[in-house]
Image (cartoon, rainbow, N blue to C red):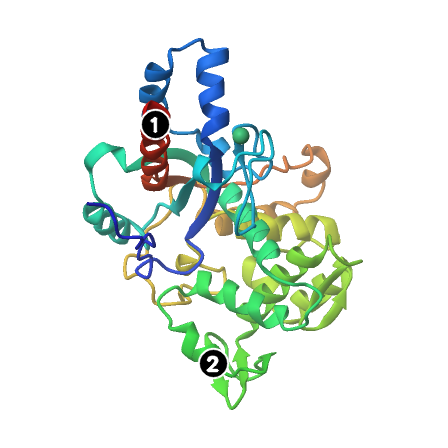
Amino acid sequence: MPTTKQRELDLSEFPPGTVTEYTTLVCLACIFDIFTKQLNLAPRTAFSEIKRHTPTIEELTSRGAMRPYFDSEEKHPHCPYCGSAKRWLARFDTYCIEGGKTTDAARRALLRKLPKAEDQFVIQEKKSDSGAVFFDWLDTLGRSLDLNDETWLIDASRMYLERREPKTNWDEVFDELRAVRRSSRLTEGWERDGVRLFLAPNLYSEALLIQYLVSRSHAHGGLTLEGRLTLSELIRRLRYSGYLEQLGITEHDPGEVFEKLINHLAATHEWSSYRTAGGSQRVGAASKKARVRTGSGSDRVAVAKRSSKKSSKPGRKKLAPPEPEVIVTEPVKLHYLIDRRDFLEKVKSVYASYAG
Ligand SMILES: [Zn+2]
């Protein structure tokens, strides 16, 4: 009998940042009302239809839920539409898992362990791309941090690194950490020295960039480990650190450079397999298979090189139309795992009290 309230799924096999959790409440009184009054179903039919019901991904994950769904942080929530109390309210937990090399095995193992009966769990897939995944990740990152508390800079550095090097035990690295600094010694990777973490210039530059992106709508300019920076100041630092050169970015206009940087980050969702123009050195030993990405990913470096050669030919650049500012991305499959257990239980208990 499903009397256990052990609801939590074990997601510890997934690299941090690859699973996003959503919780949505649904009011069974409202949904019952919709099925009987708007769809004109008999109560009994309505209940059996409701039992089969799974909300759409949009209904489960959007921040502005609509009747009969709603979000609530309260311990004893009430339906905002009809005022119904707890026993009428059911919870859907949705886990959005980014498909890819770092998550596929863990996802399959998780699915094998889940109960199959009665569609207690439902899987839905959605095609997305690395650009959307990146901006969603930034959005989630921004919401999870308190930008008024300066320690967020260290937290953001950590979340960036977790995504960049998913195999590293960052709990250990960030334990009691006080500061993140740019290393003048390392050319790649990182090292901890006392309470400080030193990052190679490319990692440090990307951490600054992520911080800038997270905070730029919060502050004038963006807040970073280097203080509050305007876009020009940020770009100057990235140029000075050699990061722009490493990516093959030769533009000087801050806006153009910024777009190239965004394109770079959005080009793949598996940052651990990044390559930079500086060499074939892969940062992070996440996977041995350095697969060349079809069409977009790895080619972007070659594209950047080609266009810098082109621009040295006199006249060529002026004749060419402005480059289309399309973000080159790669496809990513999102796997939504919907936990319907609470919903099924509540529907049954509500129906039992209704019929009895
Ligand atoms: Zn309601």
Residue at the spot 45% in from the left edge and 11% down from the top edge = 39
| Spatial CA span between label 2 and label 1 | 50 Å
Residue at the spot 76% in from the left edge and 65% down from the top edge = 229
Question: Hey, which quadrant is residue 63 in on the image?
Answer: top right
- Relative depth, front residue between 314 and 101: 101
Q: Residue furthest bottom?
A: 194
Residue at the spot 54% in from the left edge and 52% down from the top edge = 265
Residue 98 position, x and y percent, is 39, 47
Q: Earlier in the sequence, mark 2 or mark 1?
A: 2
Left or right for 203, reference 323: left
| Disc 2: which residue | 175
Q: Which mark is residue 146?
A: none
Q: Name the image quarter holding the N terminus.
A: top left
- Relative depth, front residue between 127 and 266: 127
Counting the numbered discs, the total is 2
Mark 2 or 1: in front is 1
- Secondary structure under badge 1? helix
Quick one: label 2, few (<14), some, or many (20+) residues within 10 Å? Answer: few
Question: Hey, which quadrant is residue 171 in on the image?
Answer: bottom left
Residue 304 visible in the current orientation: no
- Relative depth, front residue between 136 and 239: 136
Question: Hey, which quadrant is residue 213 in on the image?
Answer: bottom right
Q: Which mark is residue 351?
A: 1
Amino acid bearing label 2: Asp
Residue 93 position, x and y percent, is 41, 44
- Relative depth, front residue between 55 and 291: 55
Quick one: label 1, few (<14), some, or many (20+) residues within 10 Å? Answer: some
Q: Residue furthest right?
A: 220
